[in-house]
């Protein structure tokens, strides 16, 4: 089902404000050298739940940071609610997920560059069945 304009607008507002709040929390916790961004926000039809996809670089810290974010979810929700109080009537419940699309893109990039060349090493390709 396609998102309504209202869902898209709320998702955009939440994405912008969440990015700032999460970066401030990361800075306060002393995680220097770690970059965090909100890659996507999906809001349910009834506007009660917002699924937030967070991208963390370097990805080795991702699980710990997502766990830390989920533990401080109520504080994050309160701060975002203060920022959006003139734009939203009710603040949706936030659910945070790790967005590992950067790792996936990196794997594709390595495959295209030819570090594992199937022409040089045919064992990388699955054997074709002859019918």
Image (spheres, grey):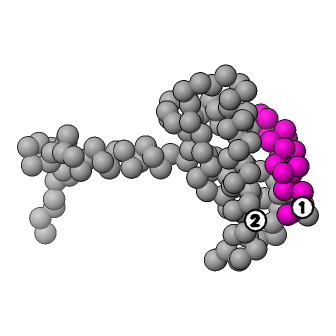
Residue tagged 1: 86
Q: Magenta-highlighted stretch: main secondary structure?
A: helix
Q: Residue at x 11, y 42 (%)?
A: 121
Q: Is residue 85 left or right of residue 119?
A: right
Q: Earlier in the sequence, mark 1 or mark 2?
A: 2
| Magenta run includes residue 1 | no
**Which quarter of the rendering shows the N terminus?**
bottom right
Q: Residue at x 12, y 64 (%)?
A: 130
| Magenta run includes residue 81 | yes
Residue 20 percent coordinates (x, y): 71, 44
Residue 87 percent coordinates (x, y): 85, 63
Magenta segment boundaries in residue numbering: 71-88
- How many residues crowd mark 2 within 10 Å: few (<14), some (14–19), many (20+)? many
Marks 1 and 2 in Cβ contact (< 8 Å): no
Residue tagged 2: 10
Q: Residue at x 63, y 77 (%)?
A: 2
Outermost left residue: 120
Q: Secondary structure at mark 1?
A: loop
Where residue 24 is drawn, which disc sits there?
none
Q: Is residue 74 left or right of residue 63?
A: right
Q: State the residue in front, 24 or 63.
A: 24
- How many residues crowd mark 1 within 10 Å: few (<14), some (14–19), many (20+)? few
Q: How many marks?
A: 2
Q: State the residue in front, 3 or 125.
A: 3
CA gap, disc 1 and disc 2: 12 Å
């Amino acid at each position: 089902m396609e998102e309504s304009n209202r869902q898209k607008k709320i998702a955009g507002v939440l994405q912008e404000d969440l990015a700032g709040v999460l970066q401030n929390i990361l800075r306060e916790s002393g995680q220097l050298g770690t970059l965090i961004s909100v890659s996507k926000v999906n809001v349910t039809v009834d506007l009660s739940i917002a699924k937030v996809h967070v991208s963390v670089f370097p990805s080795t810290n991702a699980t710990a940071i997502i766990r830390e974010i989920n533990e401080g979810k109520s504080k994050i929700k309160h701060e975002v609610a203060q920022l959006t109080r003139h734009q939203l009537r009710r603040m949706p419940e936030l659910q945070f997920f790790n967005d590992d699309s950067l790792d996936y893109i990196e794997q594709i990039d390595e495959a295209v560059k030819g570090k594992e060349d199937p022409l040089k090493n045919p064992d990388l390709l699955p054997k074709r069945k002859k019918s």
